[in-house]
Amino acid sequence: MDISLVLQAVAVLGGLGLLIGALLAYVGEKMKVQIDPKVEKIFELLPQLNCGACGYAGCELAAEAIAKGEAPPNACLVGGEEELKLIGNLLGLKVEKKLYSDKPVVNCGKGRNEVETQFEYEGLKTCAAVNAMGGDIPCSYGCLGFGDCVRVCPFDAVHIGEKGLPVFDLEKCTRCRLCEKACPRKIISFVPNDAGIYVACSNKDIGKNVREVCNVGCIACKICEKNCPNSAFKVEENLAKVDYDKCQLALVCVEKCPTKCIKQI
Amino acid sequence: MRKAFKGGIHPPEYKEISKDCQITVLEAPERVVLPLSQHVGNPAKPIVNPKDKVVKGQLVAEAQGFVSANIHSPVSGTVIAITKHPSASGIRVESLIIEREESDEEFRYEPLENPEPRSIVERVFQAGIVGLGGAAFPTHVKLSPPEEYPVDTVIINGAECEPYLTVDYRLMIENTDEIIAGALLVKEAVGARRVIIAIESNKEDAAKKIASISPSEIEVVLLPTKYPQGSEKHLIKAVLGREVPQQGLPFHVGVLVQNIQTVIAVKRAVQEGIPLYERVITVSGQAVNNPSNIKVPVGTLVSYIIDILGGLKEDAKKVILGGPMTGIALGRLDVPVTKGTSGIVALSSDIVSRYDESDTCIRCGRCVEVCPMFLQPYLLGTLGRLGRADALIENNVYDCIECGSCSFICPSKRNLVQLIRVGKSIAREVKK
């Protein structure tokens, strides 16, 4: 074969390659998309767990919002204090980590390990599935204890304790409230962070029916309502409710509650 | 014989256990429990108070709204409480509890002679009739299709595709006249041109019995035996070749489907004025000492029925209210039989399949092959487990009729129906 033919081909294709390369390099420079370098830096400082607790769909969008000033630098509820300060420095703002305004409590006093299940349940072992068929524990409002809250927690802050009730690790809990949403019986609720009492029951039946299924349930006797010096209690739908704005931690309720379903935290 | 619908399964039938047991009347219990919500729609509202005396057939709870049904007392006696009582679903529901007293008194409505279509529907509503095949959908609603969808064909559902159950079969053999009279009344009520009684091929003798005495406007059709033949949509497809549109109802294709026992109830309400307060159920299964087809007052406790029939065998493992495919496994036996209860099936430990915690799809595709709704159960199951509401809705989770064909066929023993049910409830929650 003629060697010149090979050289010709190399020269043509190589030249073409160089030409296109140069063109691409030029266009790439000319039409560059401006990314705010801050977004990337902020994103790196965020926990990147995409929990959504800040209200944005993932950490990347949150970083964008923070960089644009649409969200405060401490928008992230779960990030570490150090990181939040660094984000503040980046934006030239002084940041103090927000203290949590709330904390989770379990509105049930008896876990599945302390009650007698009504029958042998065979099937999918999740709270949602067991709840859909009425539940195997006597109380139709109480904690089922199959740990849907544990599985949904991205921070390893909930565990099923000895009694069979969820136990929170408030150090790890970031108040993202995914557990509250996951619980099919809605027995996890969030109370003010400085709350000192809570009602460990969710049963809305009348007292007689509650007593049939549980000895630590709220029987709607209204003793708390009558005795609270700050009138912080109200019994609604056969269940005691605390108005935390009024509660002064007199603790008369904890002492007087006949079934001890009002507990001190 | 017509062609069957596509998909479906052939579970063992076990109908021979109770097939030849004549319908007997059970001695009324001392106490009945009437849940206020034993039908699809709004719960009924009690119109009696504790300590009130009631007579058999008296209206004790009124329908609330159009999709709801009246409830009548099946016994004469005293209301002792209106309280939450355990129900088959495991949930405690508001129920009327009535204690029986010996009495011959009975309330009946005025029998109607040559009734107008409207008065038939009115009577069906008064008598509190609901679909007795199992769904318990108020019958007067079905008898009042919107005007723009005229019904030309009434199909009487005698498929009884659930294993074990033999209620409809016995009724077809023993109460043939009443079925024909009831079917004609239903036809009259909706102004249809013809009536078709559809029966599965495993009940050929019943089909012959009906055909031998039915007038010319009633056609008896034999269908291949296949589960879930008794599902409304599949019955219409098999009998008429018409396909009910997605999310649609039978009247969209000009059809009305009624169960065998429902038309008997219609006949009794119209011609004799008897409200719906009792029904026939099958008590069957390998763990039952005396399999039977019995007439019981609505509200009779399952435990009472089992006791009076001689109890359960020692190796009884599971008691199911309804058929084994779509029924509910009971957690306790002190729950009442409701209008929608078609049977009590007690299974022994060698029949009940082993429960397997693992949930591993081997991608064999058999669930897709048998799904009569053309869904992908393996996918819906997985999405249900993961709680992916949007993807569940995208894959038409609401079309699932929970017939259990997928769970039955799955070689990996996945609990597909349960997973899909959980998925449905998650999807509903999110939609709110």
Image (cartoon, coloured by chain):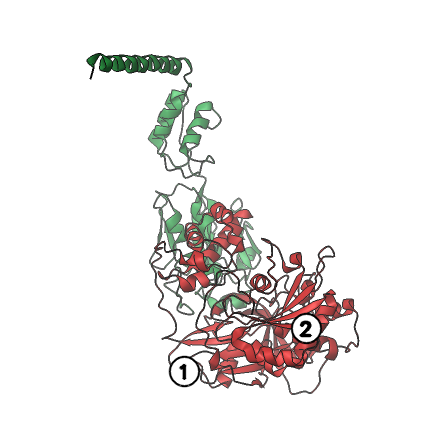
Chain colours: A green, B red
Query: Relative to the observer, which residue lies in front, B208 or A92?
Result: B208
Query: Relative to the observer, which residue lies in front, A77 or B290?
Result: B290
Residue at coordinates 42% horizontally, 15% vertically from top-left? Answer: A31
The answer to which quarter of the image holds residue A235 is bottom right
The chain ID associated with circle 2 is B
Left or right of B169, for residue A258: left
On-image quarter of the N terminus of chain A: top left
Q: CA distance from mark 1 to mark 2?
A: 43 Å
Residue at coordinates 59% horizontally, 57% vertically from top-left? Answer: B243
Query: Relative to the observer, which residue lies in front, B225 or B36?
Result: B225
Left or right of B200, for residue A56: left
Q: Which residue type carries mark 2?
A: Ile
For mark 1, what is the residue?
B313
Give the label on residue A87, or none.
Answer: none
Left or right of B324, for residue B138: right
Left or right of B183, for residue A159: left
For mark 2, what is the residue?
B218
Q: Position of residue A208 (x, y in %)?
A: 53, 68
